[in-house]
Image: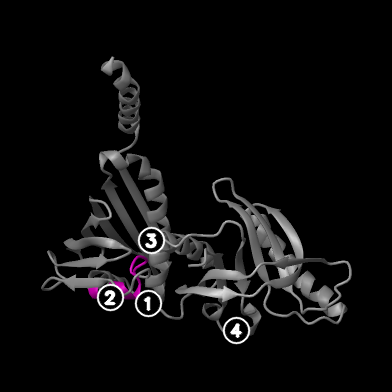
Amino acid sequence: MLYLLLLPPLIIIAAVIVHLATLPATFAVERSRLMMVDRQRLFDAVRDLGSWKAWSPWLLHEPEAELTFSDAPDHEGGSSRWDGKHIGAGSLTQMRFQAPDRIDQRLVFRRPFKARCDVWWEFKEQDGCTLVTWGMQGRMPFGLRFMVPTMSHAIAKDYELGLALLNGYLDPSASHPEIRFVGPCERAPRKAVTIPFSGSMEAMVAAMEEGFPSLAAQLEDLGITPAGAPFTVYHKVDAKAGLFVCDLAMPIPDGAAPGELVVKEFPGGRYFLTELRGSYDFLESTWHSLMAHLRMCRIKQDPSRPSLEVYAEDPRSVGHENEILTQIFIPIHAT
């Protein structure tokens, strides 16, 4: 009788083990970026583990994390360790240098899970620039094999951001992002004229390029001055399906009569604010980093309210695209 009672859970456990055994145990990620920086200078920057705090896509989340270094960390066998409340703990060891072509490193995660990964950097001259490739290959613990696709995607996005940050660190005039997690804030309700949109990211970008100038022009014809910067209100985002449902919005003052334009009021409340200085091309990386930050810090979103993307500065009003300011407001639960 006891055997019969135990049989169903045993079958479930066996099925899970069999399923995990069919999943890939290893992952490999590689990303590249062309930089107008001397190859030797790039090689030296990457081997200088002390410089990573300025451009690491992970230390960005917790710059106050504890960092310690071995003797001669920029030589083979040298290493650095990190220990943070949010980014976990681990170490990075210099395994082999082939100056100025390649660096091999060993990455060890100790918290929140244990894993070892091989990391490599390659630096190749290309058309007067340097093609920098950052790669990682590792093996997930048996019980975490289901995370391989998610892990690979996350690392790829982190690498793309990290390479852009490295480019900006060595060449401040190059297009690069500057991301700042400002933190929780209060935002007042906003009334705005709107254009609804539903479709792919490419179509959304085209709709924005046409829609925001159109809203501004129609308000000007009505003698109405916008009550702030234009913004996008995201009601639904399905990244896998490539579907975005949103409103393009131009805020208007109370009492304004915008004719036949569609007016909506968007709720205020508590939000988590993140700022991007840089080209709109880095918005995808910023969103990825922001969502990771919320998970790391265990900040819960409020799904009853939409997220907002505010274009705080007109790109035509700044001297360089690195100066463009975009603010992202994620609704969160009041604490």
Give the image location of residue 128, x and y in percent: 40, 71
Instruction: Using the numbered discs, state the Cα–Cα distance from disc 4 to disc 2 in whole angstroms.
Output: 29 Å
Sequence-wise first label, 4 or 2: 2
Q: Nearer the viewer, residue 247 or 156?
A: 247
Q: Determine contact: label 3, label 4, CB under 8 Å.
A: no
Question: Residue 51: which disc?
Answer: 2
Badge 4 element: loop
Residue of label 1: 169
Instruction: Using the numbered discs, state the Cα–Cα distance from disc 3 to disc 2 in whole angstroms.
Output: 23 Å
Specify whether residue 278 is painted magenta. no
Which residue is situated farthest in the top direction here?
A: 1
Residue of label 3: 296
Q: Could you tell me the amino acid type at mark 1?
A: Tyr
Instruction: Using the numbered discs, state the Cα–Cα distance from disc 1 to disc 4 in whole angstroms.
Output: 21 Å
| Residue 32 location, quadrant | bottom left
Q: Could you tell me the amino acid type at mark 4?
A: Val
Report the residue at 62% width, 72% height from top. Answer: 310
Specify whether residue 58 is painted magenta. yes
Is residue 126 visible in this depiction of the protein? no
Which residue is situated farthest in the front direction here?
A: 1
**From which residue to which does the magenta span run?**
50-59
Sequence-wise first label, 1 or 2: 2
Residue of label 4: 318
Give the image location of residue 167, x and y in percent: 40, 72
Instruction: Using the numbered discs, state the Cα–Cα distance from disc 1 to disc 3 in whole angstroms.
Output: 25 Å
Quarter of the image where the N terminus is located: top left
Q: Determine contact: label 1, label 2, CB under 8 Å.
A: yes
